[in-house]
Image (cartoon, rainbow, N blue to C red):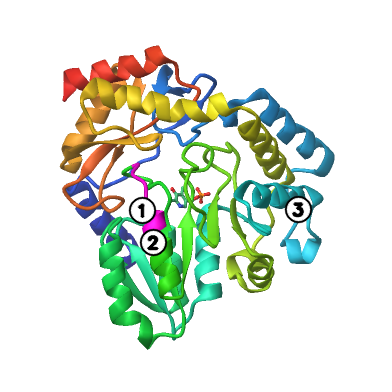
Amino acid sequence: MSSSLETFARTKLASLEAGSLRRRLVPTTRGAQASATRGGRSLVSFSCNDYLGLSQDPRVIAAAQEAAAAYGAGAGGSRLVTGSHPLLSALEERLARHKGKEAALVFGSGYLANLGIVPALAGPRDLVLVDALAHSCLWAGARASGATVATFRHNDAADLARLLAEQRAGHAHAMILTERVFSMDGDVAPLADILALAEAHDAWTLVDDAHGLGVVEAGRRAPLEMGTLSKSLGSYGGYLCADRAVIDLLTSRARSFVYTTGLPPASAAAALEALTILEAEPERRARPLMLARRFTARLGLPEAESAVVPVLVGEAEAALALSAALEERGFLVVAIRPPTVPAGTARLRVAFSAAHSEAQVDGLAEAVAALR
Ligand SMILES: *Cc1c(COP(=O)(O)O)cnc(C)c1O
């Protein structure tokens, strides 16, 4: 006889299955030159956020190995309890300098960063304005804050202005949450307009730079610049760069920082080495966008604005079928479905990396053109 818990899980799974929304883990390993191995077959992966290929860089791997050998595999506890490893302070200094900020704080992941930053700065008397297509962890942070949460239309500064005019006065503080480069659409936020509105209405802007760092960096910085160490830096962890006072406050108040274990030394060392390489090799930084534009030009798609290119399909089932057909041809390109993206906008999300060759990109473009 099955328990009510098991019945609940089975019923939920059946309804996900019916909507082509059930997700499954597929054993896959990654290697050099954007390769991935799945079911004994070698594929070219266009589904990783390793935009600069640094997760596979021998220098980054060696830095991680050396740190693990010298300091151990894990951090041993929260940084406020066991002590803060000098590698983390060094990484924070370098991140702050890269962003032109006074200070930085490293979190366990980008998700944990947003989950901690927003509630540490906003509460029930405040207003949090979120771009409609913002990443799940920005929403999680906004909801956890207990503030009034309002949504503005994606990348629509006029809609943001309307909400600020209507609602700002009734609240103590206001925050605006957006992304520099949107994770599923690859488009870029109108930050100059948003930051001007923020100044006019005394609102604090948090920009999630998960997909911009090292790839699309031009334009103004927000007062709160967060991101991840797990995409272009090829490691693991998250960060916030801001004024010193803000960082000091978060060090005491961000629950997802205070009550969780510090980053393993190896992850910090890898990110630090990756940041050094990122800054030293401008040709590497230019490559993902160049390859993405080569792809959009071949397919007659709107010109890529970042390393992420959506190929819209529509229904979840069709997106899954296209992804499976590409895998048959040797390309790993994930289908992205609701609830990650709005219903009816299931798509292939194609992510370009400095590790791809022109021939690999052309091969994918030909396959997509043939199958679409
Ligand atoms: C990936 C991602 C995150 C989460 O970063 P992790 O370090 O993977 O937890 C946050 N925001 C955006 C926009 C992302 O794409």
**Dot 2 surroundings within 10 Å: few (below 14), some, or many (20 or more)?**
many
Locate residue 275: give its quadrant: top right
The residue tagged with tag 2: helix, strand or loop? Answer: helix
220 w.r.t. 171: above or below: above
167 w.r.t. 330: above or below: below
Q: Are marks 3 and 1 in contact (CB under 8 Å)?
A: no
Q: Quadrant of the C terminus?
A: top left
What is the distance, in whole Å, between disc 3 and disc 1 at their CAs? 32 Å
Can see residue 258?
A: yes
Residue carrying label 3: 89
What is the distance, in whole Å, between disc 2 and disc 3 at their CAs? 31 Å
Using residue 107 as the reference point, say whether residue 65 is left or right of it. Answer: right
Please name the residue shown 54% across and 38% down the image: 214
Please name the residue shown 31% across and 72% down the image: 150
Amino acid type at circle 1 is Pro
Q: Main secondary structure of the magenta part?
A: loop
Residues rendered magenta in the picture:
186-193
The residue tagged with tag 1: helix, strand or loop? Answer: loop
Q: Which residue, as the protein is rendered here, is positioned at the far right?
A: 70
Badge nearest the viewer, 2 or 3: 2
- For the residue with label 2, is its CB less than 8 Å from the closest atom of ligand 1? no
Using residue 250 as the reference point, say whether residue 53 is left or right of it. Answer: left
Locate residue 184: give its quadrant: top left
Residue carrying label 2: 194
Q: Which mark is residue 190?
A: 1
Using residue 59 as the reference point, say whether residue 323 is left or right of it. Answer: left
Please name the residue shown 58% across and 38% down the image: 233
- Residue 46 included in the magenta stretch of the image: no
